Amino acid sequence: MSAGHADDGAAHDDGGHEPSGWRRWLCTTSHEDVGIIYLWLAVFWFLMGGALAMLFRTELLTPAYGPLFNLNGYNALVSLHGLTMIFLVAVPAGGVFSNYLLPHYLGLDEMAFPRLNALSGWLVFWGGVMLWFPVVGNALGLTPLPFNGGWFAYPPLVSRFARVTVSSYVFSMLILGISTTIAGINFMVTLLNERDPSLGLFDLPLGAWGLGIFTPLLGLYELPWLMVGVAFDYLQHVIGMGLFDARTGGAPLLWQWLFWLFGHPEVYFVAMPFLAIAGEIVPRFSERPIYGYRSIVYAITGITLMSGMVWAHHMYITGLGQIRYLYMFFSMAIPIAFAVYIFAMLAMMWGGRIHLKAPMLFSIGMLFMLLYSGMDGIIMSQTPVDVLIHSTWFIVGHFHFTLFGVAIMGFFAALYYYYPLMTGRMYSERLAKVHAALTIVCAPVVFTLMDTMGTRAVPMMRRYATYTYASGLQNLQIWTTAFAYVLGIAQVVLAANLLWSLKYGAEVENPWSDLLEGQGMPSPEWNGLPYEVPTPDNVPYEQGGDGRSGVDDGVAAADGGDEPLPDGGDADSEVSDGE
């Protein structure tokens, strides 16, 4: 990092008297502090959004209205849950690691624009306050129900809502969109312009590609569509411009074009940071070099480009005509790029010494959920099938497989891996494995049951607070709610573990040193520069470059670990030495 950039904001030094206590967090421009601000905001809103899910899942235990909510109350909870989980959890979750790790990946002291970096973090806070403002107002009897138009906010439905609820939605989206846009610009400039001169693009860790290039590119493409759309929505709702109202010459479908130009790339935007970070975790916890480094980069490049070409598969039922088959083609092509990525991850584990610690457990769980989500996606890309299931819970199940199964489970993997680096404390591995076991078992069950309810002869429909028209769904709803409760308890275990370890966890510098040192797996965020991407070509045989096998935590390697070693020893003794 040049001295000019460091002086600009990295030190935030005023003659040796740096702010402390709450002033430190309020005034900080340190990329590490901003990353931690993002972390606690994401965890807080994750618990709040999860609590909403528990409430409306309770409502769905009975076919008719339960004792808690009417139709509007139910849809308000569902809408707020979706908006919170996407914009206040999944998006900031990527910001945690982009802020904290990019300078470490790139050999820098600070981001290119430290003050903009701090601004982006605090805008996430104020965006959350704005989104949840009607909740507090309604509880105090001052405002109507919170926004209940779904995370997609289709006009003309939204035009029926009270002005304060629409305004809170619009301004929260604008605030959060500005936050993500300036953060993305900062990340890209930092990587492209400020990185250590010794690092070419193909010398970067996979995490740097995901956090500093692909995720910002997606954000800079998609977010302007959303911000223009919600601004138009506000103008229609407040001053009656009628941009989406056919009665005044507007086009109701214009909102869908604008929203899905944002909405589908958004799915890849929130998943991209964790697809990249999994590329850092899997080889290290398998004690293997990166397999197919350039293939992974090219695959993620293809995913990034094609994600902007498939948005209209959300609009098959709007009368697109023959052009919908073009969107079907691209929707079916994206899984090819994902297949390359999944194959590379599996190849890293094949023959490796797999350590089933919490980061690796969640990385494996994320790969499983990504595979299932992709199979769902192939089904939905078929135009005739999608027309039948479009408004059913099959879509809800698929959406959760992607958002929770990939983005949130990837967040858990990254969080457990980097929590010791960020806090200097080690969490309880036992509680982390409890969290992993409950989440990895319960989440697929919940989402598969959702898929199932969407494919019944009389399916469960989206945004329906009751299902008296198909009371036979009740048993499935009861099982879904039961597993959702257990899934919710698992997240309480996570929060308790993080908070407990923050004060009582063992102080550590690098709890993964055995995985990073002497195994051909350097890691710049832990070990610093110089750094060379570890691939089979540049990792010696005795350091695992040939696919040497071993076992750990009771997991057998693929070839049994009995191949003779060059030094005359046997694989078992080599494994023992590695332990």
Image (cartoon, rainbow, N blue to C red):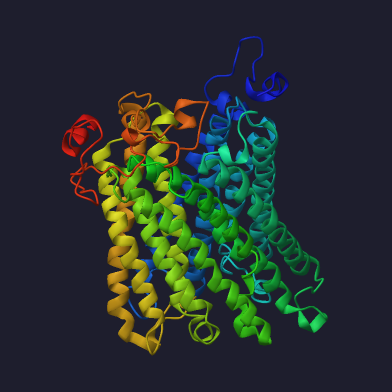
Horizontal and vertical percent for residue 135? 54, 56
Kindly identify the residue that appears in the image at 67 percent across and 66 percent down. Answer: 261
Kindly identify the residue that appears in the image at 57 percent across and 60 percent down. Answer: 303
Find residue 203 and report its image quarter: top right
Horizontal and vertical percent for residue 350? 31, 51
Find residue 507 and report its image quarter: top left
> Does residue 413 appear left or right of residue 206 in this picture?
left
Is residue 113 among what the camera can see?
no
The front one of 462 and 288 is 288
Is residue 374 among what the camera can see?
yes
Quadrant containing the N terminus is: top right
Q: Is residue 500 above or below residue 74?
A: above
Horizontal and vertical percent for residue 326? 64, 78
Quadrant containing the C terminus is: top left
> Does residue 516 appear left or right of residue 153 in this picture?
left
Number of numbered labels in the structure image? 0
Which residue is outermost to the top?
A: 15
The front one of 524 and 407 is 524
> Does residue 565 appear left or right of residue 458 in this picture?
left
Horizontal and vertical percent for residue 408? 44, 53
The front one of 432 and 169 is 432
